[in-house]
Image (cartoon, rainbow, N blue to C red):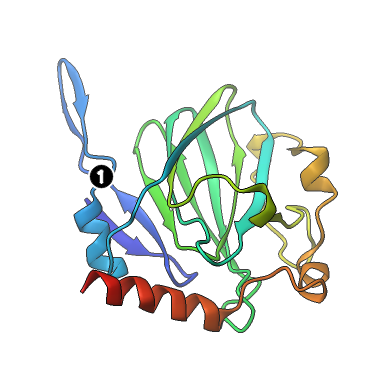
Amino acid sequence: MLIRELSVPDSYEVTPVIHADSRGAFLEWYRFDRLAEVTGHPIVLRQANTSISHRGVVRGIHFADFPLGQAKYVTVTHGAVIDYVVDVRVGSPTFGQWDSVRLDAVDRKAVYLSEGLGHAFVSLTHDTVVSYLVTDTYNPSSEHAISPLDATISLSFPTDAGQPLVSPTDLAAPTLMEALKLGLLPTWAAARSYYAELTEAAS
């Protein structure tokens, strides 16, 4: 597989090698050793999630507190999404910026985002199935959201996704600047320290 770091530090696009023949196809969609090569530490997986979304559904922007945070490895098994990684780490050189990757059931790409980064996606097809592996179990007290319609972040939704369909909870979420004032956001310094701890523990 080919792993490429995105413009938001500590997030990666993963492109698998697909072996196809007359019977169908085979691919490795996750390799802990290859991911550890680029992150500096193995990923400890604690939960696997699946969401099914209609065309136009927007989920996110979601992130979790340190520690443990919640790193995510995201792929699509049916349909297609635009997957967004948003840098919500205060003090980061790319704070408030985002990058995106199209994930679909054709190229079978995946996205890995480290702890402390925000995550969102918009579904491009009906009944899109998104599956993701995470490094911590769900803990409502440490989960936070930022409005995906925040003009400061200004996520760009493709026109073929239709009208964005956002949950009431995500619509009511604070903007990036409101979350900053409320002290909800992780910091770049805490993120770097945490990543270093993971690397040291692995050595």
| Residue lying at 65% horizontally and 36% vertically, measured from the top left | 161
Image coordinates of residue 188 in percent, x first then y, are 55, 80
Q: Quadrant of residue 145?
A: bottom right
Residue 97 in view, yes or no:
yes
The residue at the point 59 percent across, 34 percent down is 124
Horizontal and vertical percent position of residue 98: 58, 64
The image quadrant of residue 4 is bottom left
User: Which quadrant: the C terminus?
Assistant: bottom left
Please indicate whether residue 76 sits to the left or right of residue 98 in the image.
Answer: left
Q: Nearer the viewer, residue 117 or 105?
A: 117
Residue 143 can be seen in this image = no
Q: Which one is nearer the viewer's eye here, 142 or 14?
A: 142
As drawn, 11 above or below 82: below
Look at label 1 and name its amino acid: Pro
Q: What residue is pinned by disc 1?
A: 16
Give how far across and how far down residue 31 sits, in percent.
23, 48
Which residue is drawn at the image coordinates 31% and 67% (left, top)?
A: 39
